[in-house]
Image: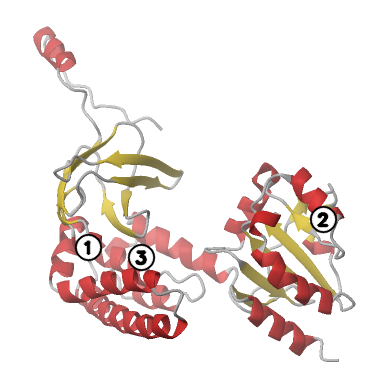
Amino acid sequence: MISRLVKYAISLTAILTLFACTQKVPYRIEGKLTNLGEAEFYAVFENENGCFVDTVMSKPNGSFSIEQKNGDYRSVTLFFENKSFWRCVFLEAGKKIKISGDAEYPALLRVKGGDRMNEQISDLRAMSVSLWKEKTDLAREISRKQSDPIEEADLMAKLTNVEHQLEEIAVDYIKNNPDEPASLALIQYFFTDPDDTRGVDELLAVISPRLRNHYLYKALEEYSVKAKRTSLGAEAPMFKVKDIFGKEVDMSQLHDEYILLAFTHSWIPADDAEKFYLAPIVYQHKSDSLEVIVLTLDNDAKEIRKIAEQDTLQWNIVADSASQVALLLDLYNVSELPRYYLIDKDKKILLKTENNMEVRDSLDDLFVK
């Protein structure tokens, strides 16, 4: 929806002056950051209808300007270092925002203007600078140590400890400020776990009734309901799609079988890691009452058919034709790939995991020979 400027009764001279000036921009963000230099980053404007992605190029001195003329947006997320780090900024139409600080630590950037949550969050994070810096440094170090599992595990343990301390600070703020919208922003940042809604549910119960109509409160409520839809023990959402051969795949018509849903990014030879791990599992249980449905984001059904026809295993593959897999990602709250869901004969979710070894072990336990 295109934002409309409020009309004022102004004289002809004022009208001419208005057209001579720069058009009013509903959302304007200006900043000057150290350690940014001439760098490219991304601004993702978000609302309930979707998002708009803007590529931002800063000047050599680290200054930048972002303008968004159209749309009704609640927030914009700035992504730095190839989307490795980010900072959410809350918007109010017509209110300019200024951002300052060190680009190496986006969480600690000082945000002024826009929604007052920005300054409240900036103030709170300024009270725990060392923890936020340690969190960012550990994240960078982990990305460099992925080839060393032992050192990576040690760094992950340290990161978990730092995040726990930051969560405690957030909980303390929320309980002492239940009538502040910033408390909702903290719940959103720290406790939106798609596999466990207890944190969101417990902290929403603390929030003042006067914030029940706030858009973040409503979003968190909806998030909790949606996450519970695919919690362990929940009835699996049903769907009906077409596989790569045009055959209808209707979950509701699969009776007396366990179902393994395998959401994966790709199913082509150039990137077939998930097929490599999944194939032995499918082969081992091909005579069991198990239906395996592969849901890939590849949308070239013709190419996938060629691959499937040459395979010794008969795969049940659904490609992302007409965005049918993208819709199922949302239906099943898939936040990362790969993601597996094991569903029992009563259509209840037994397991959801990113770990193919966990899938293998669970199936071995189910079909003990």
- Mark 2: amino acid: Ala
Determine whether the residue tagged by mark 2 lies in a helix, strand or loop.
helix
Instruction: Determine which of the numbered discs, if any, sits on residue 291 in the image.
Output: none
The residue lying at 39 percent from left, 83 percent from top is: 151
The residue lying at 50 percent from left, 69 percent from top is: 194
26 on left or right of 215? left
| Labels 3 and 2 touching (C-beta < 8 A) | no
Q: CA distance from mark 3 to mark 2?
A: 42 Å
Q: Earlier in the sequence, mark 3 or mark 1?
A: 1
Q: Which residue is mark 2?
A: 308
Q: Which residue is mark 3?
A: 188
Q: Estimate how packed mark 3 is, as few (under 14), some (14 to 19) or many (20 or more) residues with alpha carbons within 10 Å.
A: some
Q: Which residue is mark 1?
A: 105
In this view of the protein, can residue 257 be seen by the observer? no
- Mark 1: amino acid: Tyr
320 on left or right of 107? right
Q: Quadrant of the rendered structure where residue 35 is?
A: bottom left
Say which of 143 and 179 sits in front: 143
359 on left or right of 128? right
Say which of 232 and 368 sits in front: 368
Query: Could you say where residue 209 lies in the image, as x and y percent from the top left?
Result: 30, 66
Determine whether the residue tagged by mark 3 lies in a helix, strand or loop.
helix
